[in-house]
Structure formats: structure tokens, C-alpha cells
Image: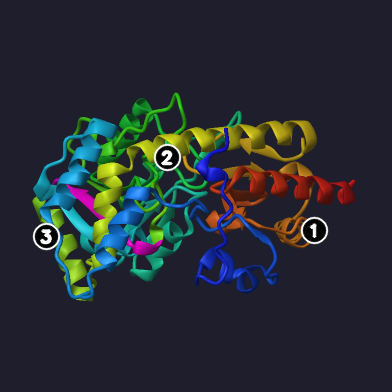
């Protein structure tokens, strides 16, 4: 049966970064855009209706966060992730990237070292320097096609003065959903050395069948943990820019609030508020259908690569709609690899080196699109690959 996710929705001319900035990023305005992390699917009907209802009111003034918003988030985390969160632990924040900077300001001092685990979402790599901190790399290890933490190297980072670890869970771009024992071992290192953790869990709801996300803050221990959550990736509303932090420690909450107050950054917006609440309150059936659809698309990509493009290997994702493609067997430099995908295949993907030098030879593909579009992309790659033989 056709799925609602099969619908082709034109986004050109909507001031979409993904579509309307193609020439700026790829020097071609006609590439199939499969890069920036938003999806080409219509948001849940409940979210559309909530926005329409709010738009029907003709005044768009300053806003506050209603208690019903907090209730919706608390209920979602409890039902979806077996996580009981107290109301006072929640801070509503602008998007996760500015929130990340605020957390660094609040939880570290100038000159402190911040640990990140590449290949990883690019702002993790730039945020320490832009906030006057030192960057320490604790690269993930790729073993038998699966990424793992390097805890011995994390000990080195601790010895070199690491004071804060930024964790990506589930991980963008490699698609790992960290298992409980992996997270517990990581947390024990951090606790032993007094390293605070900011855990970016905005992809937590996007996990494939048979896999379960474990919120870091639900694990036993006394480590200081700040968790970022958001409906943005889950329900395809990143342009609305509202996220939340779960911060159990009262002093840390106060410090983060002060960082936002210093910058005079407001997260409140009449549209982001109603979308946030409606998504968490009524979006579960839509999400369940989305996850089934994405799993089918992931399987399609894996099978196509194995049958027609053996020099490109899928790093099997356990979560997110972002696929990490190992293209090293193609024998191309990163510059050549980008040229191949853009100029020969007509695709706009994210080069792996954007996520750190550990991403050299890889590409990130966003499959949050109708399956017919993904099929077209794969066929484009297969045709272009013939020219390399």
C-alpha cells in the first residue's frame, strides 16, 4: 500500500536551506539534496492543525511556556524511554547548537578542555574554540563495521585536563545507538575524573526496530549530566527551533540559565510552542509509521549497495535517518569523492570530512525522503560509478 511518506512535496521557493541553497553549497542548483538533517515528509497532522489554529489568532506577541508543554514532554519521556523527569529539571532552550554553546560557557571555564568524539556533528568540533576552550579529540573506533568508544583514549583526555564531554547519543553521523553497558562504562570514566557530560539526544526517538535508546541520565552514578532533547528531528520541525535541556543539578541549571540571560537569547515563539506540545502529545502514531518506512528505506539502500555498488559499504545504522557510507574502496581523495557525487551523480551529500578527519573517505546520506527519491539517488550513483571502471 502507498504510504503518506511516498508523497513528493516540492520545497523549492520556501526559503529551504536544503533546497534553495543548493547552488551555494554545491555550485549546482539541480542536485538531489540529501545533506542537511531535515526530512522531506509532511509533519504530523496534529502539528499542522495546532499551527493552523494558532495562526488563526491575529496577534503574535511575546509568549511564555505553558505547563501543558512541560506535561507533554514529561509524559513522552516516561512512555517512550521509561525516564521519569521532574518538572523543575526542564529548561526550554533555542535550538541545540546555541544550547551547546551555552552549556560550555556554564559548565567550564575559559581554557578548560572539552572532549568530543569524531567523526561527529560538525558544531561539536567548532564549539570549544568559539567559546574559548581547548578541543580534545577522543575518536571513535571502527571495528568490524561498527563504531565503539575508545575508553583508554578517554582516560588520556581526562589526564590532559578534559572537563566536559559532549556525547552524541544516538550518534550523528555514524548511526550508533549506544548500548547500556557501553554508556555505563563511559559514565564511570567521566565520574572517576570529574568530567561533566552534555548528552545530545535529539535523535533518541529515531531508532530502528529491535534497538532501544538508553537516556544517559537514567544510568546509576553521580556524574553531572545535562541532556538535550527536542521534537525537531523526530517530527521534522527543526526550523521552529525549540529544544529542552534536562538538568537535575540545581547549580548547573542556574549557570545555564545565566548563560542564556547574558546572551539575551529567547526560545519562546508562539508557533514553536504549539508545535512542540502537539508533537509530543499526539505524534506517536505518525512516528511509528515513519520508523517502519525509514527501516524499509535503509534496507533498500543496503541491498542496492551490496548488489550494484560493492565499493560503497553501508555502516549499518541503528538509529537516525542519516546513513554513513564508507567509500574508501573507491580509491578517491575527499575532493574527488565530492566531485563524483555532485558532478557525476548529481547528488548533494555531506562529505565525511565535515565531521572531522576521521570521516575522510566517507559520505553522509539523508534518507528522510520518499523512497522513489532514494532509489533515483542510488541509480544515479550506479550510473556514475560505471565511468570510474
Of residues 386 and 64, which is closer to you in this image? 64
Q: Cα distance, mark 1 to mark 3?
A: 52 Å
Residue at the image position 29 percent from the left and 33 percent from the top: 80
Picture layout, residue 5 above or below residue 62: above
Left or right, 120 with reference to 340: left
Q: Which mark is residue 254?
A: 3
Q: Earlier in the sequence, mark 2 or mark 3?
A: 2
Residue at the image position 25 percent from the left and 44 percent from the top: 281
Q: Secondary structure at mark 3?
A: helix
**What stretch of residues is rendered in magenta?**
239-249
Picture layout, residue 210 above or below residue 371: above
Tell me whether the residue at label 1 lies in contact with that at label 3, contact meaning CB atoms closer than 8 angstroms: no
Q: What residue is shown with label 1?
A: 344
Tell me if I can see residue 322 in this picture.
no
Q: Secondary structure at mark 1?
A: helix
Q: What residue is shown with label 2?
A: 206
The answer to which quarter of the image holds residue 261 is bottom left
Amino acid at each position: 500500500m502507498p504510504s503518506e511518506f511516498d508523497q513528493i512535496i516540492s520545497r523549492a521557493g520556501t526559503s529551504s536551506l536544503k533546497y534553495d541553497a543548493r547552488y551555494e553549497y554545491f555550485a549546482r542548483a539541480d542536485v538531489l539534496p540529501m545533506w542537511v538533517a531535515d526530512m522531506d515528509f509532511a509533519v504530523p497532522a496534529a502539528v499542522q492543525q495546532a499551527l493552523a489554529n494558532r495562526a488563526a489568532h491575529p496577534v503574535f506577541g511575546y509568549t511564555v511556556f505553558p505547563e501543558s508543554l512541560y506535561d507533554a514532554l514529561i509524559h513522552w519521556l516516561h512512555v517512550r524511554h521509561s525516564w521519569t523527569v521532574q518538572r523543575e529539571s526542564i529548561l526550554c532552550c533555542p535550538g541545540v547548537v546555541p544550547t551547546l554553546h551555552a552549556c560550555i560557557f556554564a559548565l567550564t571555564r575559559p581554557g578548560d578542555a572539552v572532549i568530543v568524539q569524531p567523526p561527529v556533528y560538525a558544531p561539536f568540533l567548532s564549539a570549544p574554540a568559539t567559546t574559548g576552550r581547548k578541543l580534545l579529540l577522543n575518536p571513535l573506533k571502527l571495528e568490524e563495521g561498527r563504531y565503539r568508544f575508545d575508553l583508554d583514549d578517554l582516560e588520556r583526555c581526562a589526564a590532559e585536563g578534559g572537563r566536559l564531554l559532549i556525547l552524541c547519543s544516538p550518534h550523528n553521523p555514524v548511526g550508533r545507538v549506544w548500548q547500556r553497558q557501553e554508556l555505563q562504562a563511559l559514565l564511570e570514566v567521566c565520574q572517576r575524573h570529574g568530567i561533566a557530560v552534555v548528552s545530545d539526544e535529539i535523535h533518541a526517538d529515531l531508532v530502528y526496530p529491535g534497538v532501544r535508546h538508553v537516556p544517559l541520565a537514567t544510568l546509576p552514578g553521580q556524574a553531572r549530566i545535562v541532556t538535550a532533547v527536542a521534537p525537531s528531528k523526530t517530527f521534522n520541525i527543526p526550523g521552529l527551533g525549540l529544544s529542552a535541556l534536562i538538568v537535575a543539578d540545581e547549580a548547573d541549571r542556574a549557570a545555564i540559565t545565566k548563560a542564556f540571560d547574558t546572551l539575551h537569547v529567547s526560545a519562546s515563539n508562539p508557533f514553536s510552542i504549539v508545535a512542540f506540545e502537539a508533537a509530543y502529545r499526539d505524534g506517536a502514531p505518525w512516528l511509528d509509521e515513519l520508523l517502519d518506512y525509514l527501516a524499509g528505506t535503509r534496507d533498500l539502500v543496503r541491498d542496492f549497495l551490496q548488489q550494484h555498488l560493492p565499493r560503497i559499504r553501508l555502516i549499518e545504522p541503528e538509529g537516525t535517518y542519516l546513513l554513513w557510507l564508507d567509500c574508501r574502496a573507491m580509491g578517491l581523495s575527499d575532493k574527488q569523492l565530492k566531485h563524483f557525487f555532485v558532478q557525476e551523480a548529481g547528488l548533494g551529500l555531506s562529505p565525511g570530512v565535515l565531521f572531522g578527519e576521521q570521516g575522510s573517505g566517507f559520505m553522509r546520506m539523508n534518507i528522510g525522503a520518499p523512497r522513489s527519491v532514494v532509489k533515483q539517488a542510488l541509480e544515479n550513483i550506479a550510473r556514475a560509478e560505471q565511468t570510474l571502471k
